[in-house]
Amino acid sequence: MDLSFLPKYWAYFNYGVLVTVMISVSVVFFGTFIGVLVTLIKRSQVKPLTWIANLYVWVFRGTPMVVQIMIAFAWMHFNDMPTISFGVLDLDFSRLLPGIIIISLNSGAYISEIVRAGIEAVPKGQLEAAYSLGIRPRNAMRYVILPQAFKNILPALGNEFITIIKDSALLQTIGVMELWNGAQSVVTATYSPISPLLVAAFYYLMVTTVMSQLLSVLERRMAQGGNH
């Protein structure tokens, strides 16, 4: 494997992985918010809202993400958004924002099912005890149920985060300059079809491995905290 191109093109990988991590963190934040909101709507038993929430989950879980990304890019016209230079990469927000929005919506559909399972894993007696103490249903869910649910679902959320890191590569289809697109730019510049992609794969592997280790540490600490 010829790596002679690396001294000249390191920046494409270094800045590309930073963009990938930035996208992934943004998606996890918004996707978790959407997932919790959808779960609460489905539990509200307000039929029109429940129907909309179920339709949303059905659509986003039942269609390919790359199709969703292409439709969102064609439909969301952010033509006046700026392009910001980030090292050797140009971040075109007219492409970046639709990508973040659609992956967040896609992730939110999956996270809603994760959150639902986490809430159902909390013993029903917890909610009944909160009601008996005079705690309102909204506050009981916020302060009693959700904290315990998130502790239960942390491993699943961690897996979703790692999946998002890998799925962010799909944004190259609309020209977002993340790690995979940066690697393809190096392929074009060097006429080397394999080595730059292997370097990008190594970057993905390192990022997902580090995140897995950090999540494992967090899980152990939370487990130890729960035993006190």
Image (tube, grey):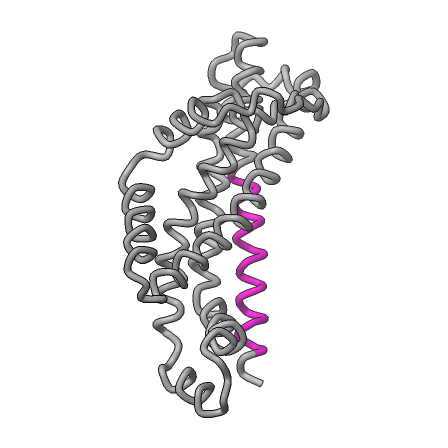
- Count of labels shown? 0
Q: Image check: 171 left or right of 10?
A: left
Which residue occupies 63% across, 15% down?
A: 5
Above or below residue 172? Residue 193 is above
Q: Image check: 165 left or right of 48?
A: right
Task: Please say whether residue 215 is one of the residues in the magenta stretch.
Answer: yes
Which residue occupies 57% across, 24% down?
A: 94
| Residue 111 placement (x, y as % from top left) | 41, 54
Q: Specify the quadrant of the image occupied by residue 182.
A: top right
- Give the magenta range: 205-225
- Front-lying residue, 226 or 198: 226
Task: Please say whether residue 139 is one of the residues in the magenta stretch.
Answer: no
Quarter of the picture holding the C terminus? bottom right
Above or below residue 145? Residue 161 is above
| Residue 152 placement (x, y as % from top left) | 44, 69
| Residue 215 placement (x, y as % from top left) | 54, 58
- Front-lying residue, 1 or 214: 214
Above or below residue 188? Residue 26 is below
Which residue occupies 60% across, 27% down?
A: 93
- Front-lying residue, 63 or 177: 63
| Residue 10 placement (x, y as % from top left) | 67, 23
Main secondary-structure element of the magenta-colored stretch: helix
Q: Image check: 168 left or right of 66?
A: right
Q: Specify the quadrant of the image occupied by residue 103.
A: top left
Which residue occupies 29% across, 36% down?
A: 63
